[in-house]
């Protein structure tokens, strides 16, 4: 099975399934001598973990990370960093009725078409539980970036048709972590929470958008042509389960604008080159220009719902299925740390690649 690694110099290879022994990974490119802040890493995992609120899946996993190599006396050695998070609250029996059925909008049929078999217990490798490995690698990348003055903050900006109308520049983004939907505007957050709860009680699901802001990234990160920084970010975000779209800067709204309104004019402030506006989203020509990098990631409604749905079995016989198990009515609140993690991996990789040029 290909496609289990991401990154060039800062590289994550992940392994594991939703209902197997656990999920883990190997990280290459971690700088030696980095203090492995276990409280911070575990805190990032806690932000992603299930069962953290009334609007998330009740699956109860502690998601405790165990580091198996690459650490000595609390610091990284520069050798491959291997880790494991054990699964403890699997209920594989919840999926027994799905063994011979293809769940609508899931990877069941495509995995079987490609590999000739599939793990029907929660989707196996296709499960979003795989993203635990990304969060660990992202947390360590954040520690590396933090020492360089780079910060990454994501938040929920839309649930269904409920949209946060304010710009991120007009908000205190730290407020996002004070409510269960992770929206930095308390009034909008409560509306989102109420709506998700309504959807949950209706045995349905709803999608949304996560916005991410990278501050402090130095100009010059990223490579032109095929490895543009926004292309790598797009690859990273579109690899996350349930993601349907990615846009940076003004994104698709740029198609409605004239160049005279969209262009970011340059200016000089205290001897530094800046732009008066940031419609480019901090990236020009595929390379960071020193302004905030910001982008949106669109998530579809969770495919598993407990309403009756029409499908077929492996023999092509039409049937009606009702999913069992524990599932999120809206994935975006728990996706916030995953989006941050993938952004951190991309930025850490870009930093190391830039160092290799010098």
Image (spheres, helix red, strand yellow):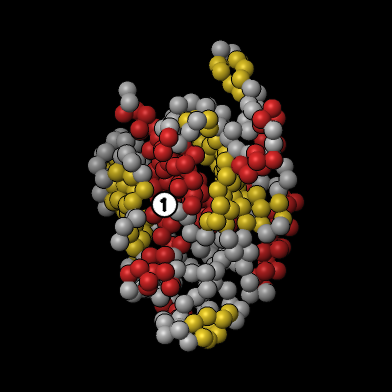
4 to the left or right of 260: left
Residue 108: image location, x then y, percent: 43, 72
In this rendering, the count of numbered labels is 1
Secondary structure at badge 1 equals helix
Residue in the picture at 59% in, 50% down: 210
Furthest toward the top, the residue is 271
Q: Is residue 327 visible?
A: no
| Image-quadrant location for residue 181 | bottom right
Residue 155 visible from this viewpoint: yes
Quadrant containing the C terminus in the rendered view:
top left
Position of 37 relative to 244 (above/below): above
Task: Name the side, left or right, on which 170 lies relative to 96.
Answer: right
Residue 112 percent location from the top left of the image: 37, 73
At horizontal 68% and vertical 59% (from top left) the residue drawn is 160
Residue 287 position in % (x across, y down)? 47, 30
When the figure is inspected, residue 289 is found, relative to residue 41, above or below; the finding is above
Q: Give the quadrant of the N terminus.
A: bottom left
Question: For this rendering, which residue is in front, 48 or 292?
Answer: 292
């Amino acid at each position: 099975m290909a496609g289990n690694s991401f990154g060039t110099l800062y590289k994550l290879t992940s392994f594991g399934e939703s209902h197997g022994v656990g999920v883990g990974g190997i990280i290459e490119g971690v700088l030696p001598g980095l203090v492995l802040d276990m409280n911070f890493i575990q805190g990032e995992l806690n932000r992603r973990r299930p069962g953290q609120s009334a609007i998330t899946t009740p699956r109860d996993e502690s998601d405790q990370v165990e580091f198996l190599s690459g650490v000595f006396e609390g610091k990284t050695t520069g050798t491959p960093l291997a880790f494991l998070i054990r699964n403890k609250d699997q209920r594989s029996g919840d999926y027994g009725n799905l063994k011979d059925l293809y769940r609508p909008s899931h990877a069941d049929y495509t995995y079987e078409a490609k590999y000739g078999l599939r793990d029907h217990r929660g989707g196996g490798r296709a499960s979003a539980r795989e993203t635990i490995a990304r969060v660990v690698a992202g947390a360590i990348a954040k520690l590396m970036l933090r020492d360089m003055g780079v910060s990454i903050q994501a938040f929920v900006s839309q649930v269904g048709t409920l949209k946060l109308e304010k710009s991120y520049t007009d908000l205190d983004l730290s407020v996002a972590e004070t409510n269960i939907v992770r929206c930095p505007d308390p009034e909008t957050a409560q509306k989102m929470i109420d709506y998700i709860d309504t959807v949950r009680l209706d045995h349905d699901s709803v999608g949304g958008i996560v916005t991410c802001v990278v501050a402090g990234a130095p100009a010059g990160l990223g490579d032109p042509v095929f490895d543009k920084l926004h292309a790598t970010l797009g690859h990273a975000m579109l690899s996350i389960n349930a993601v349907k779209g990615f846009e940076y800067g003004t994104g698709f709204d740029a198609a409605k604008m004239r160049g005279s309104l969209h262009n970011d004019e340059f200016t000089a402030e205290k001897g530094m080159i800046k732009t008066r506006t940031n419609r480019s989203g901090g990236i020009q020509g595929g390379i960071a220009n020193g302004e905030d990098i910001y982008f949106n990631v669109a998530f579809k409604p969770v495919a598993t719902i407990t309403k009756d749905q029409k499908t077929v079995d492996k023999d092509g016989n039409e049937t009606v299925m009702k999913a069992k198990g524990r599932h999120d009515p809206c994935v975006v609140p728990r996706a916030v740390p995953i989006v941050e993690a993938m952004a951190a991996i991309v930025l850490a990789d870009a930093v190391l690649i830039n160092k290799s040029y010098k």
